[in-house]
Image (tube, rainbow, N blue to C red):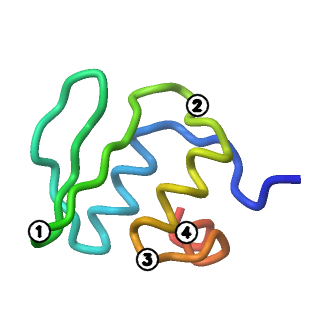
Amino acid sequence: MPKLPGIHHKDAIRVLEKLGWRVIREGKHTIMGLGTQALPIPRHNPIHSITMGQIAKAAGLTPEEFKRML
């Protein structure tokens, strides 16, 4: 069973903004940046749980930390 649920893309963006990530541009994906890192967030509703886990990992969070910030 996935550790993260599928969530709305706006919820994922809100959590990443709390961590200091900023929206760089929007299109089919929302591209968020932090320093020299870029992280694409798909604009699907909901974002698939496996994809959400990969996004959390790329942002430097464990699935449990990400879930607590929702």
Q: Position of residue 21 (x, y in %)?
A: 22, 64
Label 1: which residue? 36
What amino acid type should be assigned to the residue bearing mark 4? Phe
Mark 1 lies on a secondary structure that is loop
> Relative to 7, is 31 on the left or the right?
left
Mark 2 lies on a secondary structure that is loop
Label 2: which residue? 46
How many numbered markers are drawn?
A: 4
Residue most extreme to the right? 1
> Relative to 31, is 10 on the left or the right?
right
Q: CA distance from mark 4 to mark 1?
A: 21 Å
Q: Position of residue 64 (x, y in %)?
A: 66, 74
Q: Earlier in the sequence, mark 3 or mark 4?
A: 3
Closer to us: mark 1 or mark 3? 1
Q: Which mark is residue 10?
A: none
Q: Earlier in the sequence, mark 2 or mark 4?
A: 2
Instruction: Tell me if mark 2 has few (under 14), some (14-19) or many (20+) residues whose alpha carbon lies within 10 angstroms of its own.
Output: some
Label 3: which residue? 60
What amino acid type should be assigned to the residue bearing mark 1? Thr
Q: Earlier in the sequence, mark 2 or mark 3?
A: 2
